[in-house]
Amino acid sequence: MPIYRALIKSTGLRSDGRIDDRSFWISYVSPLPTPLVIPMVYPRMISLHDLNSKEMDGSLIPPAIPPSSEHVNDDGIYLLENGVDCLIYIGNSVDPEIMRQLLGILSFDEIPTQFVLQQYDNPLSKKLNDVINEIRRQRCCYLRLKLCKKGDPSGLLFLSYMIEDKSPSGLSYVEFLVHIHRQIQTKMS
């Protein structure tokens, strides 16, 4: 079910997308093996602001959270990877100390448009670098890193990957499941 919803919202199969973007996406994805296509259809999102408090169960990458805007808070920093890009979204109420430790940025207003990830001398920065390096290792290409901030066009780019949100032409993932459940109940009674 989530894959069906994600396919409808993916760049290559959206009915409201530009034909050039759709053609490029389909020709890019077609020869790839399934494990590399999955994040392009259903991106992986993780929270970064709480990396120190997460149990990782031996993995360098913390558990994923559903790609839905209801899981994105103004006081959080999130990473979304789609197999091509690695987007880091910064909410407008993030603790400045966490921003400084992770990204070397002192305030929300100082977020640059061009960004090079560096490792700073603290455990949070080391964990972020380990996570990004592990994700890049899992993919066949070097993922482009982009900073996205709330209230900016870059923030809208990040939010466009929220597969489980309501689309202009349909239901959210939860609404879709409720609809399917009602149809099944109707057929069963």
Image: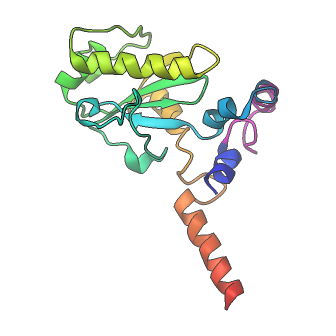
The answer to whether residue 140 is left or right of residue 47 is: right
On screen, residue 176 above or below 165: below
Q: Residue at x 38, y 34 (%)?
A: 62
Residue pictured at 44% horizontal, 46% vertical: 69
**Can residue 172 be seen at all in this image of the molecule?**
no
- Using the image, determine if residue 170 lies above or below residue 52: below
Q: How many marks?
A: 0
Residue 109 seen in this snapshot? yes
Quadrant location of residue 176? bottom right
User: Farthest left residue?
Assistant: 97
Give the magenta part as a residue range.
Answer: 10-27
Residue 41 vertical placement versus 179 (above, below): above
Measured from the top left, where is residue 123 in percent x and y? Answer: 23, 18
Q: Position of residue 177 (x, y in %)?
A: 58, 66
- Image coords of residue 37 (percent x, y): 69, 33
Name the colouring of the figure: rainbow
Q: Quadrant of the C terminus?
A: bottom right
Q: Say left or right for 34 vs 130.
A: right
Rendering coords of residue 85 (x, y %):
56, 22
Residue 106 falls inside the magenta stretch: no
- Which residue is the extreme one toward the front? 58
Q: Is residue 21 magenta?
A: yes
User: In which image quadrant can residue 63 be found?
Assistant: top left
- Residue 156 or residue 178, whichever sits in front: 178
Q: Nearer the viewer, residue 95 or 108?
A: 95
